Image (tube, rainbow, N blue to C red):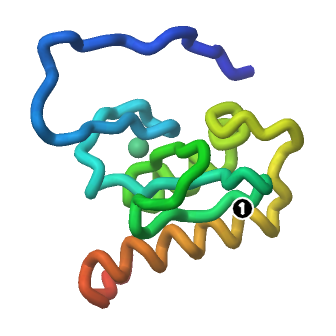
Amino acid sequence: MTVETRGRQRQGTEARRKPQRTCIACRQTRAKHELVRVVRSISGVVSVDGTGKLSGRGAYLCANDKCLERGLRGPYLENRLLIGTPLSSEERNRIHQEAQTVIESRRGGEVTSS
Ligand SMILES: [Zn+2]
């Protein structure tokens, strides 16, 4: 059972210059470059936005395996991106891979094995 926490907490005084986004899996607020943006385009295709410039409805996940897996496993993306039907496991795998590609390219090709 998932408990939906309704409404978002507003931290009024935290209007820093850095754009902060909330991870849909762990709900931690992070700087944008620490997150991966997943976008649902107008045509309904869900993909990872490596540039941050794709238009559409966006969701953010921490750039780590834990949050990617968690975010892709649960109904987080569907809820956040207002997707009517659950993503197929194929789509989830594709999104996960795209996210990892984005994360790796950000690291400058540096591969971490863990
Ligand atoms: Zn997270």
- Locate the C terminus by quadrant: bottom left
Percent position of residue 2, x then y = 68, 21
Residue 106: name its quadrant: bottom left
Residue at 55% across, 53% down: 55
> How many numbered badges does the structure rendering display?
1
* Front position in the image: 11 or 64: 11
Q: Nearer the viewer, residue 25 or 85?
A: 85
Q: Nearer the viewer, residue 55 or 48?
A: 55
Residue 46 sits in quarter: bottom right
Rate crowding at label 1 as few (under 14), some (14 to 19) or many (20 or more) other CA atoms within 10 Å: many
Q: Is residue 10 left or right of residue 84?
A: left
Residue 51 is situated, as x and y percent measured from the top left of the image, at 40, 67
**Ligand 1 location (quadrant):** top left
Point 15% across, 20% down: residue: 14
Q: Is residue 21 above or below residue 14?
A: below
Query: 13 and 113: which one is in front?
Result: 13
Left or right? Give the position of 41 relative to 67.
right
Can you identify the residue that label 1 sits on? 92
In-image side of 96 versus 34 (left or right): right
Give the amino acid at mark 1.
Answer: Arg
Q: Farthest residue toward the right?
A: 85
**14 sits to left or right of 56:** left
Residue 113: give x, y in percent of width and height: 36, 82
Task: Residue 20: name its quadrant.
Answer: top left
Secondary-structure class at tag 1:
helix
Which residue is depicted at the point 29% across and 49% down? 32
In the image, residue 20 sits, relative to residue 45, either above or below, namely above
Query: In this picture, is 66 found above or below 5?
Result: below
Q: From the top left corner, tell me how far across and down residue 21 is, in percent.
A: 34, 38
